[in-house]
Amino acid sequence: MWLHLWKHAELKRASCREGIYVSHINLHKHSLSSFAHHSSYLDLPLPNQSHLSNSSYPTMPHLRLIRPGRNTPKKYRQAKPPMKILISPSGFKESLGPSEVATCIENGIRRVLPNAAIRKVPLVDGGEGTAMTLTEHTEGELIHLEVTGPVGQKVKSYYGFLGGQSQRTAIVEMAAAAGLHMVPRNARDPTKTTTYGVGELIADALNKGAERVLIGCGDSGTSDGGAGLLQALGARLLDKEGNELPTPANGTTLTKLASMDLTTVHPRLHDIVLEVACNWQNVLLGPNGVARVYGPQKGASPEQVDLLESALDNLATVAHQRLGYEVGMLPGSGASGGMGAGLILLGAHIRPRYEAIMEWFGINDLFEDCQLVFTAEGGIDFQTPNGKIPSDVANRAKAFGIPVIALAGTVGQGADVNYQAGIDAFTSILQAPTTLDKAIAEAERLVTDAAESTMRMVMVGLSLGMGYESIATPKTPSSALSFRDFPISPIAQIS
Amino acid sequence: MWLHLWKHAELKRASCREGIYVSHINLHKHSLSSFAHHSSYLDLPLPNQSHLSNSSYPTMPHLRLIRPGRNTPKKYRQAKPPMKILISPSGFKESLGPSEVATCIENGIRRVLPNAAIRKVPLVDGGEGTAMTLTEHTEGELIHLEVTGPVGQKVKSYYGFLGGQSQRTAIVEMAAAAGLHMVPRNARDPTKTTTYGVGELIADALNKGAERVLIGCGDSGTSDGGAGLLQALGARLLDKEGNELPTPANGTTLTKLASMDLTTVHPRLHDIVLEVACNWQNVLLGPNGVARVYGPQKGASPEQVDLLESALDNLATVAHQRLGYEVGMLPGSGASGGMGAGLILLGAHIRPRYEAIMEWFGINDLFEDCQLVFTAEGGIDFQTPNGKIPSDVANRAKAFGIPVIALAGTVGQGADVNYQAGIDAFTSILQAPTTLDKAIAEAERLVTDAAESTMRMVMVGLSLGMGYESIATPKTPSSALSFRDFPISPIAQIS
């Protein structure tokens, strides 16, 4: 049989002499098996009907491969599964959601490896897109309803019930009812915005039988310490005369808070698990607190920052009275403009966002059967290793020794620290000098093209490994012929 | 010996169980040899003093490799040479010269593979940078002198004598004496510019004993049909009254040309080989001619285009009288604003630019001992396959089956045709939304970073091939132990 193959090889000599690269020449027992295994990597189905095939790799013509046929010994004929790729991107802010990014990356990869075994696990950080993505991922159900928006107007909002859970679990994304994007630019006064709508979402979930409510923080447009949310869930916020604060409460009204009556809250709140996924770094008070750090980002003037600091200090005092401990510096107390503190008053479990959210994606299981990971984020820079999605994905992948490639809208200052943080390679999706707005408008095409380009570079590397391997461990073929018998140039042997 | 290795493997079991990736576990005869060979690819010297080493790959920590030690059988200990990479970029117009681009790419690659065997062959197309690059590449000598610039002013210019040639060979780049960049923006009137300085460069080369003169066309700012060049070399351009045209001649004065006296040209012109490297597509006259296609690019108004067309038609008529054949549609006759036609009158050989120039770089020899090619150009788009440097490099590399990766300042419309033209992967060097000017100012850093990123992706692919190979052809190790005996997760075996 091997002799037979070698005769084929001999037939190809002429073209090789003429400088045409013919990997066929390298046929011997070892390299054939090697090629056979690799050909599945190159996404070529292994046809049984043809003994030798000249078909080139569809889009990378220099990767000409031998495929084993029906005369190939059984152990070499066994088709390996195609390359297993996990796509776990974040969304690109103001552009593509995480699911859209994942689909673009998949499309780009499939231009190179049409049959790759791809799993998409679009990731979210608790902010915009969290409820949608998590509900879709678990094949759950989105609930649409009208609630009070951050500036008091009625807005269309939604939350989700996760699919396939033993407990009826709701995912409430605060940004879907009180996100910064819902605050008109000319109304960006964080002393006036409220989380009332978030409370309405939770109340609806409770009314529909939720046994567990996961609240995603991030991208908030509010700084009311969760006062509005507490009201919407039935709490009575009182001033020093015992009068209820106006509904919906906001940062300004919170300055009058003197005490709180929680006996009137939604009765089901006592039966359920309330979980908050938030940035663990955000605290309620002080120089790193809500007012000082996020107030200006949400449009607060210096005076408004002072007002908010005093309002939230008020809330912390009331909380101290009720709980017996200080909440102002608790991790996550400052999440979503202090809504974390309000939720602590309701007995919620505050959890770091990726830990709380990623367990729903079962991402650790995915790494157990995967060979390459793609991740993505709008921007990659020196801050990425501080808990951004690409670095979290990389950390997890590295525990399994899996290479990670990140695509970014923008590669920013000091981005090379990510090479030490487990991201093996990253690239910007941009193709030409352009504005941010134009890049956002073209993001879909750019992400897809970048994924293709990246996958092509990976395949170039794979082909180097293959070629190298095919001469690295030369074994004497069964027949007396050796590839040294053929007058081919060194490069034809190597590549 | 192998048993000994396996004992080491056993010692590592604990860490593997804890989810830490330890490639050590995969030790068996085959994979060790495979790793040994690959480790040279990964640019790790193979130390003899340590039996097993934990040293990680310096910048890609998940690539933990086994290295063979003094107990390793000799045939597995042999170090393979490091990866052989050819860097053959074009320059980035108005930004980096081809040599600078090559150095940036080298620096980027060396961040990943410090010991890679890199050869740099910066390429030029006859235009800006040609004389400098070719002279440097052959370790020749640059001659600096003052000549007449394109608008008649005195300018500093240069040409080169190539090193290591049996014939004394000069390289004259027309853009160094009459390039568009030497025409002030407010003086861009192609009816007034002259190639007189180019003639002066050639005359100087002849005076210094040149036996062969290669003239690079491209990036010209003139449309004088080489009239100025002819004058500088001693030709007498006469009007119908037999009076000499004013010196230096230009497009406007050429309208008065009636005849030409070449008996007075530099005497050494008869002894030497005059060669022109130009775009084969450029013809002197007609709708695809100098005036109609390039006139407007050089700043001509519609009236000036008509004037130039009639001036060059004049030249063609005189040439016809002298040569007995029509030059107006000859390939290359329109090169550098019709300077090709002027040179034809002097008996020059007109050659396609890459053919004429690349033979000096010996680029075909380089492909015979190389595994990966990097090329680059300012822009890559649907026109690139029409004879631009990256596609020419790719064509040559493909004849040897070598993968080619291209870096580009800008990836333009329809760039994916290049995947069919032999470029396996390309990417833009850009990292963030920006202006062309800013990108140009940062080009050095951007090219270096892009080369690193690209090389990292290639290495990811190579690592996939390695890992796959290490289980693709499992052989029973000499000892009775098999890697199946270890309770490790599938991924730990694969990656």
Image: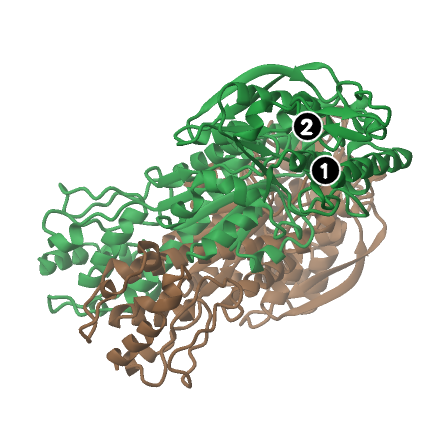
Chain colours: A brown, B green
Which residue in the protein does label 2 denote?
A: B262
Neighbor class of circle 1 (other Cα within 10 Å; few <14, some 14-19, many 20+) is some
The amino acid beneath tag 2 is: Leu
Residue A395 visible? The answer is: no
Label 1 belongs to which residue?
B322
Q: Position of residue A274 (x, y in %)?
A: 59, 56
Residue A365 in the image, given as x and y percentages of width and height: 43, 64
Does dot 2 land on a helix, a strand or a loop?
loop
Is B281 left or right of A73, judged from the image as shown?
right
Q: Quadrant of the N terminus of chain A?
A: bottom left
Circle 2 chain: B
Q: Is A461 situated left or right of A475 in this image?
A: right
Answer whether labels 1 and 2 touch (C-beta < 8 Å): yes
Q: Residue at left 52%, top 30%?
A: B271
Q: Which numbered marker is on residue B493?
A: none
Q: Position of residue A490 (x, y in %)?
A: 31, 55
Q: Using the image, determine if residue B398 lies above or below residue B310.
A: below
**Badge 1: chain ID:** B
Q: Observer-nearest residue: B351 or A230? A: B351
Q: Tell me where residue A101 sits by quadrant.
A: bottom right
Q: Nearer the viewer, residue A459 or B176?
A: B176
The kind of residue tagged 1 is Arg
Vertical relation: B288 (above or below) B171? below
Report the quarter where the C terminus of chain A lies: bottom left
Q: Residues within 10 Å of mark 2 (few under 14, many from 20)?
A: some
Out of B420 and A167, give the one closest to the viewer: B420
Please tell me whether residue B317 is drawn above or below residue A20 in the rendered image: above
